[in-house]
Image (tube, helix red, strand yellow):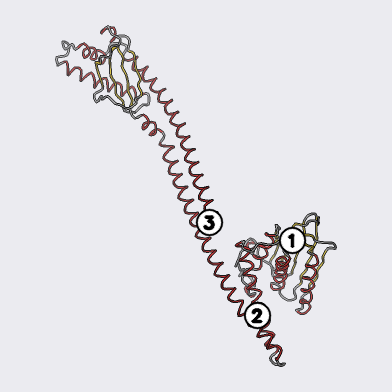
Amino acid sequence: MLNFKKGYIIIFIISVIGLAFIQYQYLKVGLNLAKVQFNSKAGQAVQAIKQDLNHQNELTFLMEQAITKDSSYFKMSVDSIQDASRYFLNDFLVDRLMQSGIKSEFNYRLFKNDSTVYLTSPNYKVSDEEQLKFPIVLSGYLPEKINERLILELQFEDLNNYFLSQLNGLTIPSLIFIIAIILVVIWVLRSLYWQRSVITTTNDFINNLTHELKTPVFSIGLATKLLSEKATDETKPIVAIIREQNNKLKVQIEKVLDLAGLESRKSVMDLQLTDFRPNLLSLATSFSKLSNLENIDFEYELQDGAYWILCEPNHLENAINNLLDNAKKYSEGKPVIRLTAVTKGNQMYVEVKDNGIGIAENELKNVFKKYHRIISGDLHKVRGYGLGLSYVKQVIRLHKGKVFLKSKINEGTVVTIKVPHQLPR
């Protein structure tokens, strides 16, 4: 179990890492697409800005006065003219960028070829971080008036944060889903291991209890044998009842032990190539003798020839005997039971059919579950522990076979087991 637990944890960690890696790749693709889209929008904004600054207007005239430091037209200081130019140019650029769908923070500077800076954005500061720059070579009115080559440079900071904000519709839900998947898987694994621990503890308890019960059962059987040797005519029926009930208790204890061993895989079946027909014939003959004593209409038909199968005879006999015992227990009036066995192709089929009280259709899927008891109809009259069919299914599964069940209320039940058949080498 420890190895399985480590395996599940390793698979879970690898899956989460793989999912995170795939999400990272999608994020990179998204960022690249966002950058391409941003460059396209910025290109449109650059063209619009260059077009608007190409001719004379209130803004370009104000910028000319600020660059040339001419205060003759505006009755204010040169510094005031330059501050006004910075703010008006900044508002103009914000408007043109917004029209192109760009809301990112930016700086600008207006300079000439020798890097002499004329105007900068109001909050301009030199940054050591890598920036995305879009230089705009101005033409028309301003360069002609100043007789210089002017460049307006747009600088964008923290573009990664801007791009990530554009992808919030993908990244945030993805992270939420990944975290939700991790939490759900952790909860499922914890529940699974807790459940396995409870099952293991329960099986250990049942095993210990049944082993403890085997000692008094053996003692009762021995005492019954001694009593039967000295029993009188009056006490013989009582001793017989004690022996019968003790045998039933021993069978139930063995059934619980066998089933717990099969489920925990501690009991490994030693499958050997066996002609199972003699075993099946002996089982049918014994049940026929019992049927004569209990007024049961029982007939069996075994196809001639050898039934070569890989099996563990004792467990397979017990499984078939369980089916016969169920057919007897769940019948009213005079039970009619038929056992047939045939080999077809590479399969051996054993069928047990009865005229019993039947099983409701909605209960058919549950009858093979451990400890499941059907309480509808008249089945509550029959005592049991819900182990018989569960044991049958486990045995047949370990023989690489299958169990099929058909039943109708008040019409009876047909149980068929299929086990691989093969010829000896």
CA gap between label 1 and label 3 equals 31 Å
x then y, percent, for residue 160: 38, 31
Q: Quickly name the residue at label 1.
A: 272
In the rendered structure, which disc, 3 or 2, sits on the residue that comes first in sequence? Answer: 3
Contact (CB < 8 A) between labels 1 and 2?
Answer: no
> From the viewer's perspective, is 107 left or right of 252?
left
Q: How many marks?
A: 3
Q: Nearer the viewer, residue 419 or 353?
A: 419
Q: Is 232 located above or below residue 401 in the figure?
A: below
x then y, percent, for residue 254: 65, 72
> From the viewer's perspective, is 351 left or right of 78?
right
Contact (CB < 8 A) between labels 3 and 2?
Answer: no
Q: Is 357 located above or below residue 78 in the figure?
A: below
Badge 1 element? strand
Residue 2 image label:
3
State the image quarter where residue 138 is shown: top left
Q: Quickly name the residue at label 2.
A: 246
x then y, percent, for residue 395: 68, 63
Badge 3 element? helix
Quadrant of the image for the N terminus?
A: bottom right
Three-letter residue code for mark 1: Gln
CA gap between label 1 and label 2 equals 32 Å
Q: Nearer the viewer, residue 347 or 10?
A: 10
Three-letter residue code for mark 3: Leu
Q: Is 97 located above or below residue 398 in the figure?
A: above
Residue 31 image label:
none
Q: Nearer the viewer, residue 34 or 61?
A: 34
CA gap between label 3 and label 2 equals 40 Å
